[in-house]
Structures are given as C-alpha cells and as structure tokens.
Image: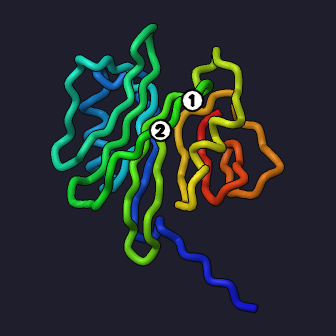
C-alpha cells in the first residue's frame, strides 16, 4: 500500500529562536529573520513584560509575557500576509506558551505553539496533551529545558516529548 504524507513545512519556513532577553537582541533577531526569510518565528525567553513594546516590520507578533519574576515569556512572529489567528492556550502548570492557528496551502490548518519550560517547574505531562488535544495537527517548539523525556505515545520528537495526538514537538534540552 502506498502512503502519502503531506508536509506543511515544504510551504512554510518555521524557526525557533531562544532570545534570552529580546530587548537587547532585537537587531540580531531582525537580521536573522531577514537572512532566512522566515515565515514564522517561535520565540522563547523574551523577558518581556506587558508594558514592553515590540514590533517587527511586516510581521504580526503574538505574545505571552511573564507577569511576575524575571525571565520567561514567549512569542510568535508571523508574516502578516499569512492567514492566521490567535489561538487561546489553556492554563498550563509547567509551561509558558502562546499559540496561533495557520492555514497552510495543500495541508490545511496547523496549530503552532511557542513554549518555554522554566527549569524550576515540575513536569506536568497533561500540559503537552492539552496543546495537542484537538483534531488539528500541532507543532510545539521552544526551550523545553530538562523536559526532554520521551513518552510511549506516537508522534515525531526532536529532543522533546511526544504526545498521543498528531503533532511534532521540538525543543532544546
């Protein structure tokens, strides 16, 4: 039997970038985006607070800022011409996350989540299940720190945790 696998990433350039403080690295990020012509940039450890202003020309930026303490925060920058919508993220105990849903030509809808797993939080497997918990395929990318455990569920993982739902999880350890 022949199997055809549709690859949304043949139409879309998605990258993950751990900023470790984006205010100081804004120029570096903009040059990086221009150099690779990224369609979507998943940003970790932005260190933004809600009052911080941040824009990138020709990109819509969706953020989830940490409200207390230092560090943390995630964002997704997506080219404005790409059809997408903000995707509410459920309450998570071990992750910071922001999400968008994008329509990919020849593939359909795809949920994208930029995540950060603070190293001091206790791992909660249900957090990943809630991100993959819809019928829409998902990509979860970001700084997963020590959460690079493999589960027995199906999925494609690069240094990350698999979910029992369809999706890809990629992250730094």
Would you identify the image quadrant in which residue 147 lies?
top right
Residue occupied by mark 1: 92
At 79% from the left and 45% from the top, the residue drawn is 151
Q: How is the image coloured?
A: rainbow
Would you identify the image quadrant in which residue 45 lies?
top left
Residue found farthest to the left: 57
- SS class, disc 2: loop
Q: Are marks 2 and 1 in contact (CB under 8 Å)?
A: yes
Give the position of the N terminus as an image quadrant: bottom right
Q: Residues within 10 Å of mark 2 (few under 14, many from 20)?
A: some
149 over 92 or under it: above or below: below
Give the position of the C terminus as an image quadrant: top right
At 63% from the left and 28% from the top, the residue drawn is 145
Residue 131 location in percent, x, y? 57, 44
Q: Residues within 10 Å of mark 1 (few under 14, many from 20)?
A: some
133 over 120 or under it: above or below: below
Residue found farthest to the top: 69
* Lateral position of residue 89 relative to residue 105, left or right: right
Q: Nearer the viewer, residue 53 or 83?
A: 83
Residue 89: mark: 2
- SS class, disc 1: loop
At 66% from the left and 49% from the top, the residue drawn is 158
Residue 114 location in percent, x, y? 47, 40
94 over 106 or under it: above or below: above
Q: Nearer the viewer, residue 75 or 21?
A: 75
């Amino acid at each position: 039997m022949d199997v055809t696998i549709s690859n949304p990433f043949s139409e879309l350039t998605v990258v993950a970038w751990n900023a470790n403080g984006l205010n100081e690295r804004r120029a570096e990020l903009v040059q990086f985006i221009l150099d690779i012509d990224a369609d979507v940039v998943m940003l970790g450890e932005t260190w933004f607070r809600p009052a911080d202003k941040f824009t990138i020309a020709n990109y819509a930026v969706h953020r989830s800022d940490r409200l207390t303490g230092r560090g943390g925060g995630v964002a997704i920058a997506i080219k404005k011409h790409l059809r997408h919508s903000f995707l509410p993220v459920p309450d998570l105990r071990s992750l910071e996350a922001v999400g968008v849903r994008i329509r990919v030509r020849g593939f359909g809808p795809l949920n994208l989540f930029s995540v950060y797993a603070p190293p001091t939080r206790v791992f909660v497997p249900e957090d990943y299940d809630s991100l993959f918990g819809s019928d829409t395929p998902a990509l979860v990318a970001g700084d997963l720190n020590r959460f690079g455990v493999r589960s027995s569920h199906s999925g494609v993982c690069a240094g990350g945790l698999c979910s029992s739902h369809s999706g890809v999880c990629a992250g730094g350890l």
